[in-house]
C-alpha cells in the first residue's frame, strides 16, 4: 500500500522541515539567467538532485520508481527560480 502524496511550495533555500520523505516530483517556475536547483539529503548531507533549467519557463520533473529517499528535503541552491513545489510522501 502506498502512502498519501503531499505538496509543499517554497521560494528560497533551506529545510522543508518535513522529516524523512521520498521526493516524487518537483515543479519549478524559473526567471531569466541560468536557473539551477540543488537538493540535499538534509542540511550538509549528500546532493541528491542537481538540475539546470531553461530560463523563463515552468518545468515539471518526475522522479522515477519510488522517488528519492531523504532524511529531510534541504534546498541548497535556488538560483533564478521564483518558486518550487515539491511533491513527496
Image: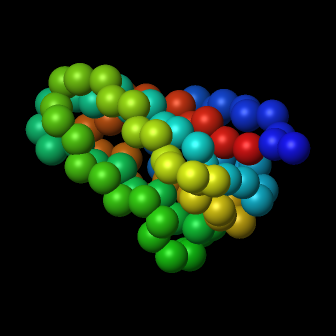
Residue 73 seen: no
Side of 50 relative to 9 (left or right): left
Instruction: Kindly identify the residue that appears in the image at 59 percent across and 67 percent down.
Output: 41
Instruction: Kindly identify the residue that appears in the image at 58 percent across and 30 percent down.
Output: 9
Instruction: Kindly identify the residue that appears in the image at 65 percent across and 62 percent down.
Output: 69
In the figure, 76 relative to 45: above or below? above
Side of 34 relative to 50 (left or right): left
Query: 11 or 46, which is in the foreground?
Result: 46
Instruction: Kindly identify the residue that appears in the image at 75 percent across and 49 percent down.
Output: 18
> Percent x, y for residue 63?
49, 47
On the rendered image, what quadrant is the N terminus found in?
Answer: top right
In the figure, 55 relative to 40: above or below? above
User: Toward which corner of the image does residue 44 lie, by quadrant?
Assistant: bottom right
> Percent x, y for residue 43?
59, 68
Q: How is the rendered protein coloured?
A: rainbow
Query: 82 or 70, which is in the foreground?
Result: 70
How many numbered marks does the figure carry? 0
On the rendered image, what quadrant is the C terminus found in?
Answer: top right
Side of 5 relative to 79 (left or right): right
> Percent x, y for residue 68?
58, 58
> Percent x, y for residue 58?
31, 24
Residue 89 seen: yes
Amino acid at each position: 500500500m502506498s502512502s498519501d502524496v503531499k505538496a509543499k511550495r517554497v521560494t528560497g533555500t533551506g529545510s522543508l522541515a518535513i522529516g524523512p520523505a521520498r521526493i516524487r516530483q518537483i515543479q519549478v517556475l524559473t526567471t531569466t539567467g541560468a536557473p539551477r536547483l540543488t537538493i540535499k539529503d538534509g542540511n550538509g548531507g549528500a546532493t541528491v538532485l542537481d538540475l539546470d533549467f531553461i530560463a523563463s519557463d515552468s518545468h515539471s520533473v518526475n522522479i522515477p520508481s519510488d522517488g528519492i529517499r531523504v532524511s529531510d528535503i534541504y534546498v541548497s541552491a535556488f538560483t533564478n527560480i521564483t518558486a518550487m513545489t515539491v511533491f513527496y510522501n
